[in-house]
């Protein structure tokens, strides 16, 4: 019986010839990523173990990215605990290098791996053909101590992409449209696999944006085939070699198949307070905003910043708007700096900040106040996600967010 | 018997415990802020043995284990929902907080009602009515029975 990409990766990690949906397998984990959102609690649990031990320290990557720089003495204490532990045990450690998933993709992830991340957007690694899935700190600790975990093999929803994006739409509009179509739990417990001739036109940045957001439909993981785009990316990022390159077999069993013509996608926004509350941008035109955010693991890469800069060049941020521009990593920041993109944003009146999760997670920089409205390239628009519980978050593409920052109200670039 | 605290569809983990509290040093310090955006009095009113009852996709969003942990710290006996988001569900089992799929309960109870869960029977009783729950897969029931995933690491 044929296997999907998800089934093949689990089989490899379990050391078995075949794995199939709804089987439970014990797997060897390739990496365990954790960030400052939960690691302090993991360390407390580790210290309470009867026999604390780390199976393989080379598998652990710890990244401080959620509150950078730190915003309070309590946060400082939690981050210090993480920093000290990483140093004591020789754990690969990043701080200020960028949002954890971007840092992992730039430096560590290779095709065929099975990776646990103590962060829901770990599914982003599917862009490189790796099975990334989000876990809590108890699962993380178990993997850290044993090097293993158990996995329920997910059924797969297959998305066959054809054509090319047009109409001013981006990969983010595509994935938001899909989430709107299948709903916030439309892929619960499932793998979302993307394939088809439409893949060829999608850049690595596009692919990361698509896979990263799949958890907003409830997906356990997202997966894509390895092609020349993947191999070129790996070659340019340390010359990493794939562990294994998988495609789904012709007779693999998909729970459902969706055919999507990319040329039909239009710019959309997710209205408060649900990511699946999707409407065309034109339905929200005129809604006044107080803040705009261009950044995050979903849409803070060089391509996104280039797109924003091309729109705002020669224009100004509306006087009523704070426009936060936050590159997703140090690599992205430096590249944008060299291209003059950050100059363009600064000259337009944007607030350019260091790589970190920023207002996407609503605890650190740029939180919004009572009654305020944010348009964001972040990952979520849940109630209170970006600050006060009585505030409003709209999600849109880098193009929509930048155009809205200029106009002071939600709009598409063509409306400027 | 325990009291019902009832929530709707798609309650995300940011609503259960908001981001600004996640880096507090301990779960005990976070717990007073549980469900702050939806029911600011929840933490003050909930008592050990009470239940959280919800509709579809409870616990969607972030992987923060603090979400089930604050519920457990406040003494919530179990979360009973029509369906759960997968990371939250797995986290609940891992920390030893029963997360039980019960399709019919939500539509027949209100906040403040008294209910009783029988894990062994796989039922919930509300007044004179009894509702069937979906039993946990054996693997997960095993984790729950031993008191969570970490307990297995502490066996000699």
Image (cartoon, coloured by chain):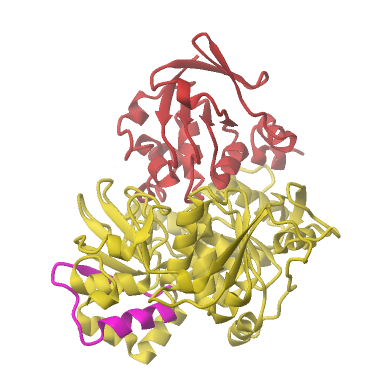
Q: Residue at x 58, y 31 (%)?
A: B101
Residue sitting at x 36%, y 65%: A396
Q: Residue furthest top?
A: B128
Vertical position of residue A96 compared to residue A79: above or below: below
Question: x, y (%) of residue B27?
Answer: 45, 40
Q: Is residue A322 magenta?
A: yes
* Residue sitting at x 68%, y 56%: A54
Q: Position of residue B106 (x, y in %)?
A: 47, 26
Residue furthest to the left in view is A319
Residue A90: x %, y % from top left: 61, 67
Q: Which chain is red?
A: B
Residue A142 position (above or below residue A100): above
Residue A73 picture location, percent across and down: 33, 54
Instruction: Tell me if A331 is positioned left or right of A246 in this view.
Output: left
Q: Taking A86 as reference, is B3 left or right?
A: left
Q: Is residue A238 above or below residue A62?
A: below
Q: Is residue A407 magenta?
A: no
**Which one is in front, A383 or B31?**
A383
> Front-most of A184 and A367?
A184
Count the labels in the image: 0
Q: Residue at x 52, y 30 (%)?
A: B79
Q: Colour of chain A?
A: yellow
Quadrant of the image occupied by residue A45: top right
Quadrant holding the C terminus of chain A: bottom left
- The range drawn in magenta is A303-328
- In the picture, the quarter occupied by the N terminus of chain A is bottom right
The answer to whether any part of residue A230 appears in the image is yes
Quick check: can you spot residue A171?
no
User: Between residues A261 and A6, which one lies in front from this camera angle?
Assistant: A261
């Amino acid at each position: 019986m044929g296997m999907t990409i998800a089934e093949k990766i689990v089989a490899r990690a379990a050391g078995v010839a075949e794995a199939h949906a709804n089987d439970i397998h014990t797997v060897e984990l390739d990496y365990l990523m954790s960030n400052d959102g939960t690691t302090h609690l993991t360390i407390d649990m580790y210290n309470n173990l009867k026999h604390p031990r780390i199976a393989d320290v080379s598998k652990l990557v710890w990244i401080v990215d959620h509150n950078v720089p730190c915003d309070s003495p309590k946060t400082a204490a939690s981050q210090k605990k993480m920093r000290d532990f990483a140093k004591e045990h020789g754990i690969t450690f990043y701080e200020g290098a960028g949002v954890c998933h971007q840092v992992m993709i730039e430096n560590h992830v290779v095709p065929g791996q099975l990776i646990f991340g103590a962060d829901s957007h770990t599914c982003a690694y599917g862009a490189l053909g790796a099975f990334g899935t989000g876990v809590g700190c108890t699962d993380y600790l178990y993997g850290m101590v044993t090097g293993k975990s158990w996995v329920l093999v997910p059924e797969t929803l297959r998305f066959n992409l054809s054509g090319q994006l047009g109409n001013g739409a981006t990969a983010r509009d595509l994935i938001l449209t899909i989430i709107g179509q299948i709903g916030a739990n439309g892929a619960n417990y499932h793998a979302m696999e993307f394939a088809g001739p439409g893949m060829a036109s999608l850049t690595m940045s596009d692919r990361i944006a698509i896979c990263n957001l799949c958890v907003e439909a409830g997906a356990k993981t997202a997966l894509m085939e390895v092609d020349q785009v993947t191999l070129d990316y790996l070659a340019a990022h340390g010359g990493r070699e794939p562990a294994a390159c998988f495609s789904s077999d012709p007779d693999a069993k998909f729970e459902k198949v969706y055919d999507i013509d990319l040329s039909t996608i239009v710019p959309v926004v997710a209205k408060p307070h649900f990511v699946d509350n999707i409407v065309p941008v034109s339905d929200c035109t005129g809604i006044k905003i107080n803040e705009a955010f261009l950044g995050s693991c979903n849409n803070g890469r060089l391509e996104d910043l280039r797109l924003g800069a091309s729109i705002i060049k020669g224009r100004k941020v509306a006087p009523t708007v704070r426009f936060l521009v936050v590159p997703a990593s140090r690599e992205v920041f430096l590249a944008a700096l060299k291209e003059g993109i950050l100059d363009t944003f600064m000259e337009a009146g944007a607030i350019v900040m260091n790589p970190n999760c920023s207002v996407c997670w609503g605890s650190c920089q740029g939180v919004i106040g009572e009654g305020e409205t944010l348009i964001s390239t972040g990952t979520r628009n849940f109630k209170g996600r970006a600050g006060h519980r009585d505030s409003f978050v709209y999600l849109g593409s880098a193009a929509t967010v930048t155009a809205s920052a200029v106009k002071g109200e939600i709009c598409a670039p063509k409306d400027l | 018997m325990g009291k019902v605290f009832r929530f709707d569809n798609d309650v995300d983990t940011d609503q259960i415990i908001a981001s600004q509290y996640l880096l507090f040093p301990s779960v005990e310090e976070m717990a007073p802020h549980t469900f702050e955006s939806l029911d600011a009095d929840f933490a003050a009113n909930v008592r050990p043995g009470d239940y959280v009852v919800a509709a579809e996709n409870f616990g969607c969003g972030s992987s923060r284990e603090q979400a089930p942990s604050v519920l457990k710290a406040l003494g919530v006996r179990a979360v009973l929902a029509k369906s759960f988001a997968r990371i939250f569900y797995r986290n609940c089992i891992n920390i030893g907080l029963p997360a039980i799929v019960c399709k019919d309960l939500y539509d027949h109870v209100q906040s403040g009602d008294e209910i009783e869960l029988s894990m062994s029977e796989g039922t919930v009783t509300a007044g004179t009515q009894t509702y069937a729950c979906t039993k946990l897969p054996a693997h997960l029931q095993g984790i729950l029975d031993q008191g969570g995933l970490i307990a297995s690491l502490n066996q000699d």
